[in-house]
Amino acid sequence: MIYTWHQKIWDQLVATRNANHLPHAILISGAEGIGKQAFAEALVNSLLCESPQENYNACGQCKSCHVKHSDAHPDYYQASIAENKTQIVVDQIRQLNNFLHMSRSYQGSRVAYINPAESLNVNAANSLLKSLEEPANNSVIILVTSQISTLLATIKSRCQMLHLPTPNKQVALHWLSLQSTQHSPEELLEMSAGKPLYALKLDNEEHFKRRKDFAHDLSAAINQRQSVTEVSKKWQNSPKDELLDWQIHWVQQLIKYHFNTKQHLPALAIPQSANLNHLWTLHDELIKFREIAHTSLNAQLFIENMLLSWVKLY
């Protein structure tokens, strides 16, 4: 599925394919929750299809499409974070490298899909370079990332980069208004920092309760009603990306409040005394935490250090 705000990028890709200039490696980047995975999956299906339509959408009818739908396609390999792991490891990429040099079972391309690419550990990333430098015939490697700055420069330089934009507020609100949501599209879009698919994911009571509970515990740590260790133990099994998204959004609200007192303040029971420079410093620190969230760092220590950034501020 190609979302309307990404159609222009798809059309550019169609023109590239019509000119027989499809690259052997494509790096798709953009913010989390804007439809990158849907775009990448549409591209995968298109490349595997034996009879793609005029705009290169997969036909959905050929044998190759049916086999892909059954999740058993011999010309497709996916590398993602395995269960109980925090990174994509070198053995997965070695298998990918071997896969690319096998003979094809169908008329489409052999396709390797890596998502999220920022989760490649150092050895895996270096192993991937061989296939990027010496591409196999009739093969395409597709990488997807929300954190392009963390990827090796050598990987980025060997890929055709496609940056997928976040839709503007009007487009995102229109799309959300067409979905069946429990909460208002405006509220969801505000919470998701303008990311429509992430906004839809937030639209459930369990998420709202978890967000409220974390705000309470973060406030307790800042005000020294609970220790940082207690709070970090409670939340160590939670997705680090989710915790960081909440905090980054709250800091952004505090920053906006400095410029416009009509801006909604976050649901944090904390003093509003932090100056603007300190808030920007905290924002930058949280962004850096996001860049290492997929590494194998100890979860409790990771969250402790994250919370200490707030405690230092107040």
Image: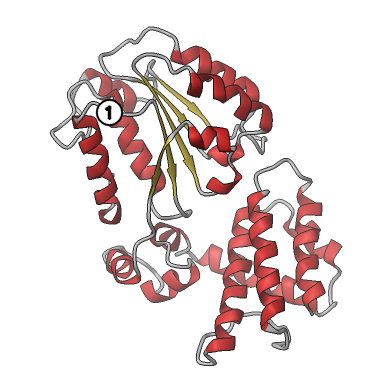
Residue depicted at 39% across the width and 61% down the height: 196
**As drawn, 146 above or below 304:** above
- Is residue 284 rendered to the left or right of residue 140? right
Residue depicted at 39% across the width and 15% down the height: 74
The 10 Å Cα crowd at callout 1, few under 14, some 14 to 19, many 20 or more, is few
- Is residue 40 rendered to the left or right of residue 271? left
Percent coordinates x, y for residue 83 in the rendering: 62, 34
Front residue of 224/165: it is: 165
**As drawn, 302 above or below 64:** below
In the picture as drawn, the residue positioned furthest to the left comes out as 54
Picture quadrant where residue 39 is located? top left
Residue depicted at 28% across the width and 52% down the height: 3
**As drawn, 198 above or below 154:** below
What residue is shown with label 1?
21
Picture quadrant where residue 62 is located? top left
Tell me if I can see residue 221 in this picture: no
Front residue of 163/243: it is: 163
Tell me if I can see residue 137 in this picture: yes
In the picture as drawn, the residue positioned furthest to the bottom comes out as 261
Scheme of colours in the image: secondary structure
Percent coordinates x, y for residue 141 in the rendering: 43, 27
Element type at mark 1: loop
Percent coordinates x, y for residue 63 in the rendering: 23, 18
Percent coordinates x, y for residue 67 in the rendering: 31, 21
**As drawn, 143 above or below 244:** above
Residue depicted at 36% across the width and 44% down the height: 38
Picture quadrant where residue 308 is located? bottom right
Three-letter code for the amino acid on which mark 1 is drawn = His
Q: Quadrant of the N terminus?
A: top left
